[in-house]
Each structure stands twice: as C-alpha cells, then as structure tokens.
Image: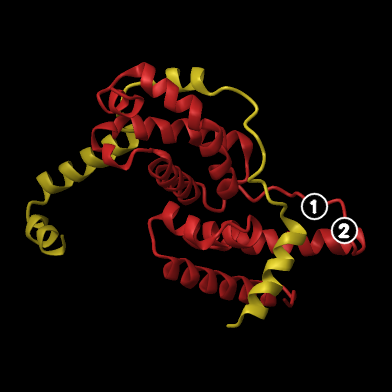
C-alpha cells in the first residue's frame, strides 16, 4: 500500500510524510496570494487540516495530491481574504531600485496598494498571481478551479477596476 | 482593453510589489499541524448561538412571521 492509499485510509504517518513533502510548496503558493508569511503559515496548516478531513474524498487514481492540495490552498487563501477584507493591507515592499523621488514614489505606491486592496478576493488573487508573480494562466486556472478563459476574464475585470481606482486617485496607467 | 493596457498596470504593480513566490518556509509546521489536529473539529461561535436564540424567540412570540419567512426562503 503506497503513501496516498495509507493517507486515504487515515494513517497519520502517511499524512505526516505528505505534509513534509508538500508544506513548502503549499506555503509558497499561499504566500503568492496573501503576501504575509505569518498568515501563509497559518493557512498552510489550515490547508492540510482541510485535506486531512477530506481524505476519504481523495481520488487515488490521480496518483498525486499536489493539484488537489493547491486547490484547497487557494480556497483557504480566498476565504482568508474574504474574512479580512479591508482589514489587512498589502505589505509595503518597495524594490531597492526606485527611480522616482522617494516622497512621490511612496505616495504612488500607497495609491497602488490601496487600489489592489479594494479588489474583490477573486480578482485580487488573479491580478497578483498573473501580473506580479507571473504565474501561467493554466496554473492559476487549475488552482482556482476555473477555466483559463475565466482567468483572462477576471484579469481584464481586475485591470479595469484597478485603472478606474488609480484614475480616481490621479494616477494614470 | 488591450495587452498594452494590461502591461501598463503590470509595470505599475511590479514597481510596488515584489514577487514573493520564491520565498522559502522558515520553519517546520508539523508541530503546529499536530496541535491543529488535536483541536475539536467544529465549534459554533457564541454569537451564532445568540442569533439562533433571538430568531427562535422572535418566531415563538410572533408566529405570524413564519409563513412570510418561509415565503422568502
């Protein structure tokens, strides 16, 4: 019996083996969406908790639990964004190679982060994954459980909302 | 909307937000996972119990609301 079969049967050692194998990958994926390490750690544990509870539903014929875990992780991250919407702003991480004067750059960055914060969680996730992390549409689609075309639609809608927000704030993209 | 407009927004975002997907996990989370597994599976927050009690009391005192409630469900 392999590790996935033992996990599906409720074997804690098999679960630990899968946890240790995938915890880094799940953490990095969640980090791309929530951009906060403490939150990403909590949501990584939450992801594996949901996986453990749903172990009986795991399709052993797939031979791997990676895509399933990424889907659970995405749902956990989106649930977090819905719960904490407008409470936790994006971190202020200015790259070292800023070309504009500091005050102007700080103000511009504040407006941009504010505009991203205003996006609904599904749009925000797609915008961050596609434009900042440059994740392929196929990966985003699989992780969010939507089609690649739906990813494009969310991207267009997100960009449109961002452009409107930034325009109202006097920033023209 | 065209690709040029998307690229403009992408450049603005990338000036303010660095990619974080390459950051590594700094600690083993298995101990935290074990603590999570020891917690009860489901807990109803006290506010939900309060809301449920209030709704039940309301329906008991004003049973005429039940058909209206059922209609809207």
Tag 1 residue: A94
In what quadrant of the picture does the N terminus of chain A appear? top left
Query: What is the C-alpha distance between the residues marked 2 and 1?
Result: 8 Å
* Neighbourhood count class around disc 2 (C-alpha, 10 Å): few under 14, some 14–19, many 20 upward: few
Residue B68 image offset from top left, x and y in percent: 11, 62
Dividing the picture into quarters, in which one does residue A64 lie? top left
The answer to whether the residues at label 2 and label 1 have Cβ atoms under 8 Å apart is yes
Image point (56%, 49%), residue name: A33
Dividing the picture into quarters, in which one does residue A7 lie? top left
Secondary structure beneath disc 2?
Answer: loop
Residue A159 image offset from top left, x and y in percent: 59, 72
Dividing the picture into quarters, in which one does residue A56 lie? top left
Task: From the viewer's side, name the closer residue of A151 and A108.
Answer: A151
Residue A14 image offset from top left, x and y in percent: 37, 21
In what quadrant of the picture does the C terminus of chain A appear? bottom right
Tag 2 residue: A98
Is residue A27 in view? yes
Instruction: Report which colour depicts chain B.
Output: yellow
Image point (38%, 30%), residue name: A49
For residue B63, side relative to residue B5 (left or right): left
Instruction: Report which colour depicts chain A.
Output: red
Q: Chain of mark 2?
A: A
In this picture, is A149 found above or below A127?
below
């Amino acid at each position: 019996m392999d590790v996935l079969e033992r996990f599906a049967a409720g074997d804690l050692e098999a679960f630990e083996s899968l946890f240790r194998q995938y915890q880094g990958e799940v953490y990095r994926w969640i980090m791309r969406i929530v951009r906060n390490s403490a939150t990403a750690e909590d949501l990584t544990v939450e992801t594996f908790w949901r996986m453990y509870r749903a172990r009986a539903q795991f399709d052993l014929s797939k031979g791997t639990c990676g895509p399933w875990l990424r889907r659970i992780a995405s749902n956990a991250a989106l649930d977090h964004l819905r719960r904490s919407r407008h409470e936790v702003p994006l971190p202020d991480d200015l790259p070292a190679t800023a070309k504009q004067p500091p005050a102007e750059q700080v103000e511009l960055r504040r407006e941009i982060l504010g505009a991203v914060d205003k996006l609904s969680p599904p749009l925000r996730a797609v915008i961050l994954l596609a434009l900042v992390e440059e994740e392929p549409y196929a990966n985003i689609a699989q992780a969010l459980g939507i089609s690649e075309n739906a990813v494009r639609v969310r991207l267009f809608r997100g960009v449109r909302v961002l452009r409107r927000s930034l325009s109202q704030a006097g920033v023209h993209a | 909307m065209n690709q040029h407009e998307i690229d403009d927004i992408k450049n603005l975002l990338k000036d303010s937000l660095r990619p974080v997907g390459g950051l590594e996990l700094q600690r083993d989370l298995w101990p935290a996972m074990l603590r999570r597994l020891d917690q009860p599976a489901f807990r109803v927050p006290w506010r939900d119990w309060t809301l449920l009690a209030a709704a039940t009391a309301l329906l008991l005192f004003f049973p005429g609301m039940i058909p209206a409630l059922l209609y809207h469900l």
